[in-house]
Amino acid sequence: MRKILATLIAITSLGYSSAFAGTLVINTDLTDPAPKAAFDWAFKKFQEENPDVTIEVNNFDHEGYKQAIRNFLTTSPPDIFNWYAGNRMLPFVRAGLVEDVSDIWSDTGWVDGNLTEGMSHAKKPMTIGGKQWGIPYTYYQWGVYYRKDIFDANGISVPTTWDEFVAACATLKAAGVTPITIGSKYLWTTAGVFDYLNLRTNGYEFHMALTKGEVPYTDPKVHAVFDKWDELVKPGYFLENHASLAWQEAIPPMVNGEAAMYVMGNFSVALFKEGGLTNDNLGFFQFPEITPGVPMAEEAPTDTMHIASGAKNKIDAKRFLIFLSRADVQEEMNKTLGQLPVNSGSKVDPDPFLEAGLNMLNNAYAMAQFYDRDAPAEMASEGMKGFQEYMVNPDRRDKILERLEKVRQRVYK
Amino acid sequence: MVSYTTPFLTVPNSTQFTYRKSSWWKRNQQRLTPWIFLFPGLLLFLVYVIWPIFNSLYISLLQWDGLSPAIFVGISNYVELLDDEYFYISLMNNLKWLILFMLAVPIGLGLAIFLNQTIFGIRLIKSLFFFPFVISQVVIGIIFSWFYNPRGVIGPFLDKIGLGNYAILADENFATYGIIFAGIYPQIAYCMILYLTGLNNLNTDQIEAGRMDGAKGLSLFKNIILPQLKPATFLAIVVTVIGSLRSFDMVAIMTQGGPYGSSNVLAYYMFETALSEYGYRMGYGSAIAAVLFTIMMFYILFFIYRMYQGEKKGL
């Protein structure tokens, strides 16, 4: 019965397509080699399956896109654009520039239910005000990347608790190795550390409440996070001069063996390997437990595709989003991207980092998007500035948290 | 003679009469022509300068993310500015820029005098000195960031002479000075070229006369050469002040206002709050712009007043 229904829907949608066939305008900033290759493949495949649709892609450079998106969404909206889940899409959703795609997430004639089945775990970050606003096609894990050989040489095993982690840092420091490398020039790397410290100290619910602005930054629980952070910052376990380095510039110290760990996203693996590290000496472990009993939530930023509310070809745009959510499409695209498919029906390449990530995320209690996607833009920018200042001047903690509290009261009023 | 003049006088008289009667255009031509020539420029000035000024003053009274409908909030953006730590940091940094940038004028003068010689190949040397002004500010910013990088040139050098590796751009106390130093580098070249042209136009008679009266060295320079360079000095100061208040590109390239906002200047802070990746506060950004505009306005009014006084004396 279900199959028949599906075919019926397929036929009707085919009927639709010939009636509404046309050009599909897609704006993206996916110009880096891997994402570009993945999307080139997806566009080609979509056109093979839908020969009646012509795809027109406008590529923007990565930084320029963040400004351009405001202009093109208001003045000349494309049919489809890429963006990010969580609060990062809130200003556009609130301004009515993004099309509500709840219908393709539910079974109202567009899909036969597979979407909600394979992607239900990713529905929450796509939801604002009870509606879904796009389709996630890839995500990746955050965690600690480390030098296996340096750990071995110093007799350190992979830490699973906070005490072990701090002890490992102490051992490394004593051996003349910088325990943790970081480049905080562009601020966001500090948020990765903060997120994990908060997720592990206070748990997912508190972290979400904080990024939603429901908890003051001067709360004792936030101070508890910085107490833990103190244990790393005050003994100097982070790379010196990190405020002058971009995140990529903090990779050479680890490749050279001057540093041993990096709290980072999986996209860094490509750079580590380019620098000469291999699966033999580069490893990954989950950020260790801090407060025992707090369920382990993970950081897994999701990349997404959306339909502009001003799109001219919404029918084909929805067909493309459905295509993008398919298990086989996500599997193939993420092979090229070197990231994790969101659809749980997709398989992952046999890569130790992806397998570790998938395993970790499948067992995760919940997934956070990242500080600058969970918190609204203004709060995120001030927050990350504060984190950087704290990492350079840990003594200013109180002043920084008071300032962030002031910002919170303004942003969320 | 008489028979000759009479018809000659009557003819223009009659034509003048018909001119006056027939054409409003001919009558007002003299008055209108300058306006007609000015019209395209005035129109552009109105559309691209005057209107945006008033528009941003208006936006500064709004709470607006650039996308959703705007809310009128009166002067609350300005009230918030008064309580904004980053605003004061940026303002102070603008002041540092303004003061330190002035060094470009005497240094440029020194270089110009040094290069104002007639030896073989001096043209090549002059153009080499002028080179920093020709290359883009962005390129200079990037090159200086490499210099300052702890793994670049200056850090390892300081390390070698025992001062310890130092990341200038990551230090809240020195980042601004690091950027100003990079920014002053092309500005010196600019001032130098202004003075070089000034030196070319020196009145040799006056110098000769001065020499005969026994002036030499410093007193010759101070009393005879420097007064003649006054137009060049004036221009050099003007472009340097404007250059320092416009300091945006260097900050954007080298630190993005960091670490944690300590090297911000008003122009970049305005961009950061209104237009950058996380900036959605058009109203607040416009309020910063209004403050920057006021500062510039004071300076420009002073400049216009000086020019007016100068012309009154000169003419």
Image (cartoon, coloured by chain):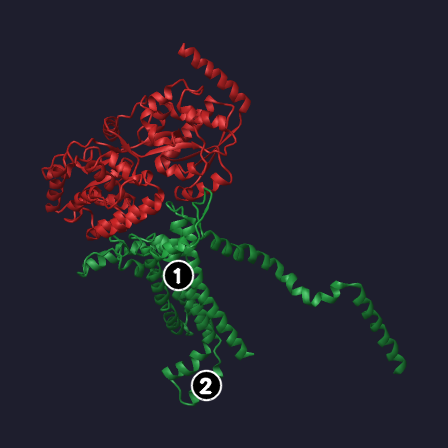
What chain is colored red?
A: A
Q: Quadrant of the N terminus of chain A?
A: top left
Mark 2 belongs to which subunit?
B
Q: Is residue A25 above or below residue B117?
A: above
Q: Secondary structure at mark 1?
A: helix
Is residue A268 at all visible to an observer of this figure?
Answer: no
Residue at the disc numbered 2: B208
| Front position in the image: A201 or A361 | A201
Q: Is residue A195 above or below residue B125?
A: above
Mark 1 belongs to which subunit?
B
Mark 1 and mark 2: Cα distance apart in space:
35 Å
Question: What residue type is disc 1 on?
Answer: Pro
Same chain check for tags 1 and 2: yes
Residue at the disc numbered 1: B132
Q: Is residue B95 above or below residue B59?
A: below
The tint chain B carries is green
Task: Identify the residue shown where x is 38% and y is 50%.
Answer: B273
| Front position in the image: A13 or A293 | A293
Is residue B198 at all visible to an observer of this figure?
Answer: yes
In the picture as drawn, the residue positioned furthest to the right comes out as B3
Q: Give x and y (percent) for residue A111.
A: 42, 20
